[in-house]
Amino acid sequence: MDQLDVLGAGRMGRALAGRAAARGLGVRVHRRLHLMPAGSPAVPVLLALPLEHLEELDPELLAGRVVVDAMNAWGDAAELMPAAVHPGGTSGAVAEHLRHSRVVKAFNHLSYHDVEVAPGGAGGAAGADGEDGDLEARGPGGADPASGPDHRRALLVAGDDPTARTVVSGLVVAMGFAPVEAPLARGRLAEPGNVLFGQHLTAAGMRATLARHPSRAA
């Protein structure tokens, strides 16, 4: 895992891109899907867009790609979004729309500030330049010498494709976090207002929380 495409140049997209670049990944940030160059199926695409733009994404342009869903339903209008009331959670709606992609939910239960200040990160958000706001960057990377595996902050990696989950778990590790894998439906526990959202847990702590909430949502 050494490349990442980020779709979305808002605060979260730039924070994740900045952290990935600081950790040694080659990163491209794109404001619009239709202007994103065709990429290798081996390169994940991280969605950091407002969820209300989901229906604007052309599924064919992401066919065959591993798609990392970091989006959430926010604000008063959230309950009006079809994705917000999908029985499989918002990522279930993303997977249904991007039917030719392998969707994995991750990073959505962090804030952009969490991404920036977590140990081993960039210390700030990445910028963007060019007509489409593309950023191409590669940082020095490196490990977190003071943070062993048992102390890293855990991130839920929820998906139904085992290979795609493994890819995204590798991305999570590369970004300095500890992955905890689960089926896609369990991703509802990481949505705003649910038990994993905003929580600072180790991998052991997250697994314990998942065990206490065996249903899809709390």
Image: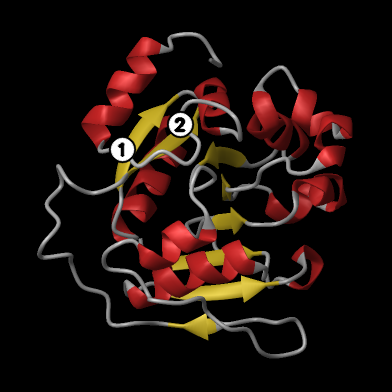
Label 2's element?
A: loop
- Give the residue type that dot 1 points to: Leu
- Residue at mark 2: 196
Q: Quadrant of residue 165?
A: top left
Cα separation, mark 1 vs mark 2, equals 9 Å
Q: Which residue shows up at 77% across the image and 88% down it?
A: 131
* Residue 94: % across, % down: 70, 37
- Give the residue type that dot 2 points to: Leu
Determine whether 199 is above or below 38 in the image: above
Determine whether 132 is above or below 6 in the image: below
Coloured how?
A: secondary structure
Residues under numbered marks 1 and 2 in contact, where contact means CB atoms less than 8 Å apart: yes
Q: Residue furthest bottom?
A: 130
* Residue 42: % across, % down: 47, 57
Q: Residue 99: in sight, yes or no?
A: no
Sequence-earlier tag: 1 or 2: 2
- Residue at mark 1: 201
* Residue 61: % across, % down: 75, 56
Q: Which residue shows up at 85% across the image and 45% down it?
A: 55
Q: Which residue shows up at 41% across the image and 70% down it?
A: 19
Determine whether 85 is above or below 134 in the image: above
Q: Quadrant of residue 176?
A: bottom left
Label 1's element?
A: loop
* Residue 188: % across, % down: 57, 25
